[in-house]
Amino acid sequence: MDALPVRLPLALPYRALVDMLNKQLVLPKVNPAYYHLLALCLSVLFLYTETPWQKIALLGVVLAADWLDGATVKRHYQPSKTGYITDVATDRASEAFIFAGAAETLTGQVFFLLWLVNSSLAFYSVCTNKHVALPLRFAYLVLLALPGM
Amino acid sequence: MASTLAHATSASLIALTAAQVQPHETGYILAAVVAASILDLDHVVLVVRDRALYQQLGYRGQLHHARSAFHELFGLLLAGILSALLFLVDPRLGQVVFIAFAVHVVQDWVLGKAHPLAPADNTEMQLFSLTFGQKVLVDAVLLIVFGGLWTLYLFGYL
């Protein structure tokens, strides 16, 4: 099996927190591809959202699906290079739809440019075996939830 | 992977409705249809180049070999750079082109085999292991559903 890119030490406290929360979850053994498909379909649906609350709700579900796919793999399957590549690719595609849909605003255009950086980082990660990615959808969710945005 | 006609009908309509393009804005419609289908030109180039191989293997279930890196995240990244430049001139055109292209790429990822991080890494990804018959069925459903939606769109009901 090919080695999985390792996470940077900066991300370790966050991963420890997520792993702790994962232990509390009841996770059925389903094919993680269904969570990827759900996240992708909802990201396309994001193109049609109009109000900030619609965007926040949909983004929340997309991020939850992304979390559940990772947690399911850790609980029921053996993490693999194929799974890592699938996760990275579907995450970047999900971000592509979300930020392309928001590109009529300046904030959306900034996030779209950051998506270009994030996609480049996916290639950097597999070339250097160090996983580097910006949590863009989470940052966008926080920004949407801020009053006055 | 879906047929080029299924990509052209579905990906272009998603892009047009998401960018709120009206049915009389033919320039955007043309751009969406081209962006949704142009990617499949790489199949033609690679199938012609490797025709001896395909005559041995057959075409059914083998066309994922006829995908260049443009069909992967690399292509999406290039389309993103082009669209970012288009945002400076005409943001809606940038949106239409990018969304149509991205839907095509993702449809192929969901329905078939891909190497999303090629050329940097050739690990194969297959979300669902669909049979040829299931792929034909998905293709037919896409054509029927989006053919109907196109009719509604052109008559101003979407």
Image (tube, coloured by chain):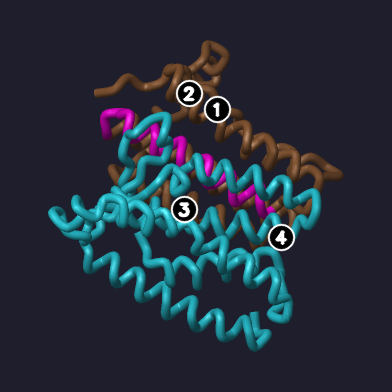
Magenta stretch: give its range.
A77-101
Classed neighbour count for the residue bearing mark 1: other residues with Cα under 10 Å, few (<14), some (14–19), many (≥20): some
- Do the residues under discs 2 and 1 have CB atoms within 8 angstroms? yes
What residue is drawn where x is 67% and y is 54%?
A101
Q: CA distance from mark 2 to mark 3?
A: 21 Å
Q: CA distance from mark 1 to mark 4?
A: 26 Å
* Residue B105: numbered disc: 3
What amino acid is labelled 2 in the image?
Ser
Q: Main secondary structure of the magenta part?
A: helix
* Residue A125: numbered disc: 2
Asked whether A96 falls inside the magenta stretch, the response is yes
Q: CA distance from mark 3 to mark 1?
A: 19 Å
* Residue B93: numbered disc: 4
Q: Position of residue A10 (x, y in %)?
A: 57, 14
Q: Chain of mark 3?
A: B
Position of B122 compared to B34: left or right?
left
The answer to whether dots 2 and 3 both sit on one chain is no
